[in-house]
Amino acid sequence: MIHVDADDPTPPFEQIRAGLAAEIQSGRLPGGRRLPTVRQLAGDLHVAVGTVARAYRELEEAGLVSTHRSQGTVVRDGQTTRIDLTHAAADFVRNIRRQDTDLEELITAIKIAWNSEN
């Protein structure tokens, strides 16, 4: 699902928030899906409970999730959006540059992946 990169200058709560927001908006986390508890996700990602709590709070403020005492934190219905290709491409390129991949190699890999999808 998501991970926290200790080498990324982005604060961990923001990495978690952005990762979950992307999962929700892409539909990979559909409406009605219950998110892990704050404690569970903090343990899974090896971060402080407060870090995950802040990410969840910001997702709730953005209207992507709702938190109820009896149900926990649940993805709200109707949150799937069309992906912002410019933003997604910028994230992708930023991550791929860490791998010392040149542009031609990257374009070839994208073409192969594109053509292998049904």
Image: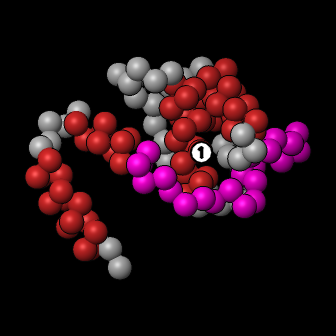
User: Is residue 49 in view?
Assistant: no
- Residue occupying the point 35% across, 22% down: 7
User: Is residue 9 in view?
Assistant: yes
In the foreground, 75 or 82: 82
Q: Position of residue 35 (x, y in %)?
A: 68, 46
- The C terminus sits in image quarter: bottom left
- Residue occupying the point 73% across, 31% down: 57
Q: Position of residue 97 (x, y in %)?
A: 22, 36
In the foreground, 13 or 105: 105
Badge count:
1
What is the secondary structure assignment of the residue under circle 1? helix
What residue is pinned by disc 1? 21
Which region of the structure is painted magenta? 65-88
- Residue occupying the point 12% across, 43% down: 102
Q: Residue most toward the bottom? A: 118
In the foreground, 75 or 97: 97
In the foreground, 56 or 63: 63
Q: Position of residue 111 (x, y in %)?
A: 21, 66
Say whether residue 14 is magenta.
no
Q: Is residue 99 left or right of residue 3?
A: left
- Residue occupying the point 72% across, 52% down: 75
